[in-house]
Image (spheres, rainbow, N blue to C red):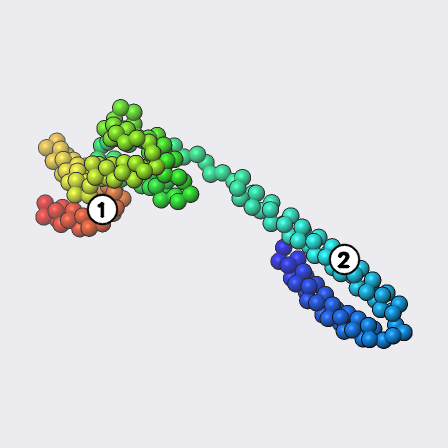
């Protein structure tokens, strides 16, 4: 395609120079009394190569379009594998996992707000606290951001999530300590739990520092 575009540009440049020469010749012939027939023949030749020029430009344009269109069609026909949306029940400890997936839909400007509302309804478990909250808003484009704000306020407050994750970790430590496990056995589940929650803690920004301080003092 790039080569065709270059050739077209060169072709246009040559035609413009030829056309300038043709105009100069026509002016000279038009001022000569005994060159009427020669002038008419020259005009006919000029029209013929002008028609030829237009024909060639049209062919090049069509060829360029044929080169571009399949690529665009190929892009449009390419489909990503279908992703099953993680359903949110309303348990605060599961909110970050839910939101990390759903925010791809939330941030997609090509999706209409009313469609995002439908995706949101599909992403909450039936008869759950989360579904009841979402259903409290009529499924309209105007209510979508309101439903999202309420979900975040109800289940995604950072201070609440920090408390939940710290409590989970401390409960695990206390449970293992009471069971009389060795230090090695005690550390293994704690390590697994820490790794599982690490990604969620990173999403809590400012509150992550508070968590680290709490764990240090404990």
Q: Measuring 17% from the left and 40% from the top, which residue is drawn there?
A: 160
Dot 1, crowdedness within 10 Å: few (<14), some or many (≥20)?
Answer: some
Q: Measuring 26% from the left and 24% from the top, which residue is drawn there?
A: 127
Q: How many marks?
A: 2
Q: Measuring 34% from the left and 37% from the top, which residue is drawn there?
A: 141
Dot 2, crowdedness within 10 Å: few (<14), some or many (≥20)?
Answer: few
Q: Earlier in the sequence, mark 1 or mark 2?
A: 2
Question: Which of the two marks, 1 or 2, is nearer to us in this view?
Answer: 2
Task: Indicate whether 70 appears above or below 92.
Answer: below
The quarter of the rendered structure image containing the N terminus is bottom right
Residue 163 screen position, x and y as percent: 15, 40
Residue at the front extreme of this rendering: 33
Residue 217 screen position, x and y as percent: 9, 48
In the structure shown, which secondary structural element does the residue marked by tag 2 occupy? helix
Residue 35 screen position, x and y as percent: 88, 72
Q: Quadrant of residue 48?
A: bottom right
Residue 203 screen position, x and y as percent: 25, 46
Q: Measuring 11% from the left and 36% from the top, which residue is drawn there?
A: 174
Task: Indicate whether 20 appears above or below 95.
Answer: below
Q: Which residue is mark 1?
A: 204
> Which of 181 and 202 lies nearest the eye of the viewer?
202
The quarter of the rendered structure image containing the C terminus is top left
Task: Indicate whether 206 appears above or below 172.
Answer: below
> Which of 192 and 24 lies nearest the eye of the viewer?
24
Task: Indicate whether 27 appears above or below 56.
Answer: below
Q: Give left or right: position of 218 versus 79.
A: left
In the structure shown, which secondary structural element does the residue marked by tag 1 occupy? loop
Q: Disc 1 to disc 2, how far (Cα)?
A: 69 Å
Q: Is residue 133 visible?
A: yes
Q: Which residue is mark 2?
A: 51
């Amino acid at each position: 395609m790039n080569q065709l575009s270059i050739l077209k540009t060169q072709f246009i440049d040559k035609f413009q120079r030829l056309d300038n020469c043709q105009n100069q010749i026509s002016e000279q012939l038009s001022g000569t009394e005994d060159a009427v027939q020669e002038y008419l023949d020259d005009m006919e030749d000029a029209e013929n190569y002008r028609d030829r020029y237009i024909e060639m430009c049209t062919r090049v344009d069509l060829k360029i379009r044929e080169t571009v269109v399949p690529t665009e069609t190929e892009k449009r026909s390419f489909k990503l594998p279908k992703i099953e949306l993680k359903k949110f029940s309303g348990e605060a400890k599961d909110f970050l996992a839910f939101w990390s997936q759903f925010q791809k839909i939330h941030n997609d400007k090509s999706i209409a707000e009313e469609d995002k509302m439908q995706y949101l309804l599909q992403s909450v478990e039936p008869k759950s606290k989360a579904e009841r909250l979402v259903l409290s808003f009529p499924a309209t484009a105007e209510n979508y951001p309101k439903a999202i704000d309420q979900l975040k306020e109800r289940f995604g407050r950072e201070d609440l999530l920090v408390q939940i994750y710290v409590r989970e970790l401390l409960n695990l430590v206390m449970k293992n300590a009471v069971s009389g496990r060795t230090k090695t056995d005690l550390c293994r589940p704690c390590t697994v739990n820490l790794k599982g929650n690490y990604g969620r803690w990173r999403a809590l920004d400012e509150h992550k520092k508070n968590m680290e301080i709490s764990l240090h003092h404990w």
